[in-house]
Image (cartoon, rainbow, N blue to C red):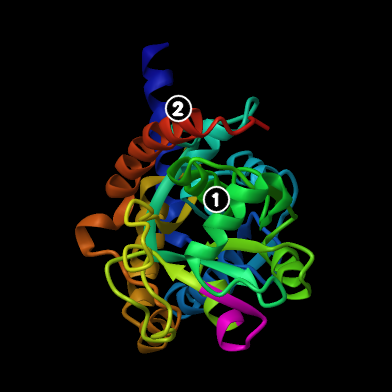
Amino acid sequence: MRARLWLGCLLAFCATDAMAQDYPARTITMIVPSAPGGTLDALGRLMAQAMSPDLGRGVVIENVTGAGSLVGMQRIVRSDPEGYVIGFGNVGSMAANVATTRDLGFDPRTDLTPISIVANVPMVLAASSRSGVRELATLISRIRERGEGVTFGTPGAGTTGHLAPAYLFTLIGSKALLVPYRGAGPAMSDLAAGTVDAMIDQSVALIPAHQGRTAVALAITGPVRAAQMPDVPTFAEAGLPGFDMVIWNAIAGPRGMPPAVQQRLVRAIEAALASPAVIARFADLASTMPPPEQRGPEAMRRRIAADVESWTQVVRSSGMALQ
């Protein structure tokens, strides 16, 4: 009996190892848990395109929206772990959602196979060009005077663009009204139309809006101004040094992914990050590549665990309603 059990385990291991060596044998789907047109979508498409040559197979994007990032993340964690469905998320969808959602249905610390963090992106606070707001101090004064009469569009509950204003409100001691959308794209459209007064999102989305004058950037996180918006001060320069939120974006798979498949994807990611086209595009978007010690499965696993704890504290302090 023991011999048969041992033989069965050996055959299963060999089959898994052989599958990993042949990987990928077909197209890979990368799920982006947000609508087209937002930051996750833009960065996910960039990485998918750049990973494909090294993998020798196409990596196609599938946008899965609903309940903030929840529907897309649930699709990722429930997929077969053989490596043909992976996900592109960030600190909101892969860590902070534990703090913002009552019934998440999964735990990113245990139900994801971390592959690598690929980009750190600063946050930009922007006002609608129709709001009349041109400085951070003016917006803060307006929030303190009008409270929920001031509206912030967000990409959805639990997303980084929803967490960021909640964090801002804890720092200024007053709240505006959060208006969640199904992704950053729709929220950006309403910001441009003046339907909402302001928005905080990653620089990937808001630098083009500022340059195109569909929104007015008021401040950017990080220690220095962005070269693409030299007229926009850092939060510290604008008078709010405590707001220093930079967002990591990463690739993960469902729990149980074979280590050889995980490592094959790591190699493809590293090849993509070394691509001149990706390096140039990151620079265009004021994004930075994490140093090697902050990339890879173990670094990402540690980062998820740490951010679950830190964002749980932020959400409790802010009084944000759980979804």
N-terminal of the pair, mark 1 or mark 2, is 2
Provide the residue designation for mark 1.
165
Left or right placement of residue 37 versus residue 22 in this view: right
Q: Nearer the viewer, residue 243 or 132?
A: 132
Amino acid type shown at disc 1: Pro
Q: Quadrant of residue 8?
A: top left
Disc 2 is placed on an element classified as: helix
Label 2 crowding class (10 Å Cα cut-off): few <14, some 14-19, many 20+? few
The residue shown at (32%, 70%) is 289
Amino acid type shown at disc 2: Gly
Residue numbers of the magenta segment: 209-217
Q: Quadrant of residue 213?
A: bottom right
The residue shown at (38%, 33%) is 10
Label 1 crowding class (10 Å Cα cut-off): few <14, some 14-19, many 20+? many
Please say whether residue 229 is visible from this viewpoint: yes
Q: Position of residue 106 (x, y in %)?
A: 57, 31
Give above or below for 7 relative to 261: above
The circle drawn on residue 8 is 2
The residue shown at (46%, 49%) is 91
Which residue is situated farthest in the front direction here?
Answer: 145
The quarter of the rendered structure image containing the N terminus is top left
Q: Nearer the viewer, residue 258 or 138?
A: 138
